[in-house]
Image (tube, rainbow, N blue to C red):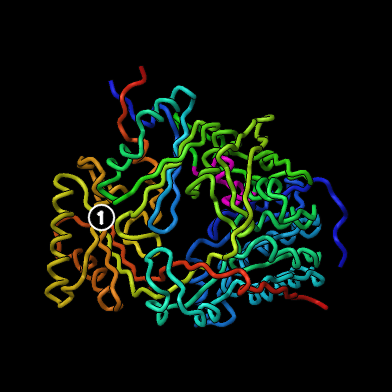
Amino acid sequence: MTQSKSKNQIRIGGGAGFSGDRIDSAVELAAKGELDYIVLECLAERTVALGNLIKIREPDKGYSETLSARIKTLLPVCLPKGVRIISNMGSANPMAAAEKSYEIARELGFPDMQVAVVLGDDVLDIIKNKPGLILLESGKPLESILPQVISANAYLGADAIIPALNTGHALVLTGRVADPSLFLSPMIHEFNWSYNNYKLLAQGTVAGHLLECAGQLTGGYFADPGKKNVPDLARLGFPYADVTREGKVTLGKAPDTGGRLDVMTCTEQLIYEIHDPSRYITPDCILDVTDIQFKLNSLNCVHVFGARALPRTDTYKVSVGYMRGYMGDGQISYAGPNAVERARLAGEVVAERLKNRGFDHLEIHEDLIGINSLHGKASPAKDPYEIRLRLAVKCPDKTAADAVGEEVEALLTNGPAGGGGFFRQTKELVAIESVFLPRHLVKPTLHTIGKL
Amino acid sequence: MNIIVYNIAHARAGDKGRTVNISVTAFDEAGFRHLKQHLTPEKVAESFFPIADGPVSRYELGKLNAFNFVVENIRGGGVTVSLSHDIHGKSLSYLMLGIVLPEIS
């Protein structure tokens, strides 16, 4: 298929910032935003590892759980308008995600739709055969957790997606790709930007970074009533960026929606989840946002300038997922006179009962929700009217994890007076560590699903 | 009369493993200068000490009247294995905004 017609400016929408993001807002953006591309970023740090855990048990699953709902609602809007979709919803199983998407397309009456799939981020076999890798967080050798490892995925860059975009297919699905790279790829594809032009890579990457959490740029996660008001937050509109061939970036928001896009919202999102602002490392470049400036051109229209970058590093960051046993959690609430003392007594009783049942190795994490569950010992002491006790443990065996919830449940008839609103859960814990892998060991590949 | 950071700035927190970063953006330049003088990494480390071992680094984005604080070694260990109620530490922006500072002269 040939390259799409030459353009000097493209519009890329941020249609999802995580797997649980609002689908209505994405549909509204695609319908009203006059987009060329919509990017759906749906993978948190641990999501691919959890997907892999599902895939091990159900080989045709392991892609994003919200894929079907997103594809079903977005295809009928995007396909007639020629808006191409780029998403990492492939998660641990991009091929199965593509098959599912193609099946949905046929059901919706789009039998000609094809899906381009990017593989190669799964490097589990490669790291297993590469001794001497060091875990970044703990400093220990990878071998120390290898028996528990269930996934290893490299954060691919924009260049891995270019062959998929060259196919011209309406939907591009990937596994793990660095979030800003999902947005940078259509810019490189349309404008043929070089990896030697750091000014352009910088502007494109910062645009991607700003869009990658969707509504967090346009007033989501921002409102503080009376202090930082957000108009019509319930109808929060998602953002887009207009990017020119020369790297000029202008941000906008879906028309006739709620939210706000201005220097304050952009500044909060620029600094979101970055460390040293002069060295934000992506697979495409080392971005420097120290001298970034935002200029409000008109209502909900912001010009971004001042990004710089250095050449990309010669390694890929790889997220390694491994089993860490189980987490058990039980919760119960108390209110009125002496509520906090009753909650504290409940915690002591559960701890003693667990010990008496032989679970004496458990380290119990206690939260008094309403007092200290969010800021721990940094919270000022002040008793509220009502209080929720939460007890949590992590341990290698499920029986012990279950026991915490069981004992909290038993408080209903065997604990202090007036406990209510009980809840319990046990979850498998998948932990994440990271390693750096030399670039040359990782080989992204392109596949196609759909009618030939 | 003392003030709190909340009076002169806004903030957002994000996480990467056992590290949390919190942006603090002053509403104006006077606020930025006040933060620069008083909201030092040492001051933040002291306020966060009950929940994090540190260190705390402070980066400046002067053209935006903003700082990025990076607080390392949050106790209880990282989003993927933490037993905390808020595993991501997302609410820590408001611990930052509650830090007491001298009033602006």
Given residues A382 and A156, the one toward you in this image is A156
Q: Can you name the residue that lies furthest to the top here? A: B105
Given residues A423 and A227, the one toward you in this image is A227
Where residue A245 sits in the image (x, y, percent)? 79, 46
The residue at which mark 1 appears reads as: A367
Residue A55 appearing in the image: yes
Is A327 placed above or below A377 here?
below
Is A88 placed above or below A397 here?
above
Q: Is residue A215 magenta?
A: yes
Q: Residues within 10 Å of mark 1 (few under 14, many from 20)?
A: many
Residue A299 shown left or right of residue A1 in the figure = left
Given residues A402 and A175, the one toward you in this image is A175
| Residue in the image at 30% along x and 65% along y | A329
> Which image quadrant: the C terminus of chain A?
bottom right
Where residue B85 sits in the image (x, y, percent)? 33, 56
**In which chain is the residue bearing label 1?**
A
Region in magenta: A208-221
Count how many numbered circles sit on residues in the image. 1
Residue A209 shown left or right of residue B19 in the figure = right
| Residue in the image at 16% along x and 66% along y | A351
Where residue A207 sits in the image (x, y, percent)? 65, 46
- For badge 1, the amino acid type reads Asp
| Residue in the image at 55% along x and 74% along y | A62
Where residue A133 sits in the image (x, y, percent)? 46, 73
Is B24 placed above or below A439 here?
above
Residue A66 appearing in the image: no
| The image quarter in which residue A391 lies | bottom left
| The image quarter in which residue A167 lies | bottom right
Q: Secondary structure at mark 1?
A: strand
> Which image quadrant: the N terminus of chain A?
bottom right
